[in-house]
């Protein structure tokens, strides 16, 4: 069985979900910032392809070049992003989690542009999901939780 790839906008809770789910299923938080930028995104995509059969879920970057590379490789993925009106909530969360000031400013400056790029997506391998409600993130998303419960049921485990 292949993992589902969960691409998510910065601050959507990939790392938080990873920390919760890793106690239940095989999950990988593949942080793109740890890959050599000289060979990016090729090296990142190769890493994902190597890990896809060993995991149930892989959390991946939402960078446009990653999304485009996944399309070139004909790899399906789900992309989660916040609605535009959640901007202040996300900026507050970035500050609360002590994200670097430069990152916060970059996201703030590109918020509308990046969300527009996601919404204008025509990648046939990308399945987009807008999380519109305040407090809605990957770790409490019903679709993700249903998938986790399905895996647990298939393995004969009970969800706690």
Image (tube, rainbow, N blue to C red):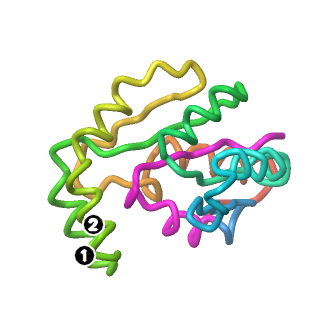
Is 14 positioned to the left or the right of 69 in the image? left
Residue at 64% over, 47% down: 41
Task: Kindly identify the residue that appears in the image at 58 percent across and 72 percent down.
Answer: 19
Mark linked to residue 95? 1
Q: Which residues are magenta?
A: 1-21
The residue nearer to you, when weighing 46 against 88, is 46
Does the segment drawn in magenta span residue 43?
Answer: no
Q: How many marks?
A: 2
Q: Tell me residue 103's x, y (percent).
A: 33, 66
Judged from the image, the secondary structure of the residue bearing numbered disc 2 is helix
User: Could you say which quadrant of the image residue 157 lies in?
Assistant: bottom right
State which quadrant residue 100 falls in: bottom left
Please provide percent x and percent y for residue 39. Answer: 69, 52
Q: Position of residue 75 (x, y in %)?
A: 69, 31
Give above or below for 33 relative to 131: below
* Residue 115 numbered tag: none
Q: Which mark is residue 104?
A: 2
């Amino acid at each position: 069985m292949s993992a589902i790839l969960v691409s998510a906008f910065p601050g959507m809770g990939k790392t938080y979900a990873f920390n919760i789910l890793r106690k239940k299923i095989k999950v990988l938080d593949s942080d793109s910032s740890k890959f050599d930028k000289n060979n990016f995104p090729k090296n990142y995509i190769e890493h994902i392809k190597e890990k896809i059969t060993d995991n149930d879920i892989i959390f991946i970057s939402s960078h446009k070049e990653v999304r485009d590379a996944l399309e070139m490789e004909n790899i399906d993925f789900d992309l989660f992003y916040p609605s535009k009106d959640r901007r202040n909530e996300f900026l507050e969360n970035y500050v609360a989690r002590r994200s670097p000031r430069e990152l916060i400013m970059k996201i703030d400056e590109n918020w509308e542009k990046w969300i527009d790029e996601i919404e204008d997506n025509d990648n046939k391998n990308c399945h987009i999901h807008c999380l519109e409600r305040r407090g809605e993130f990957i770790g409490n998303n019903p679709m993700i939780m249903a998938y986790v419960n399905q895996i647990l049921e298939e393995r004969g485990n009970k969800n706690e």
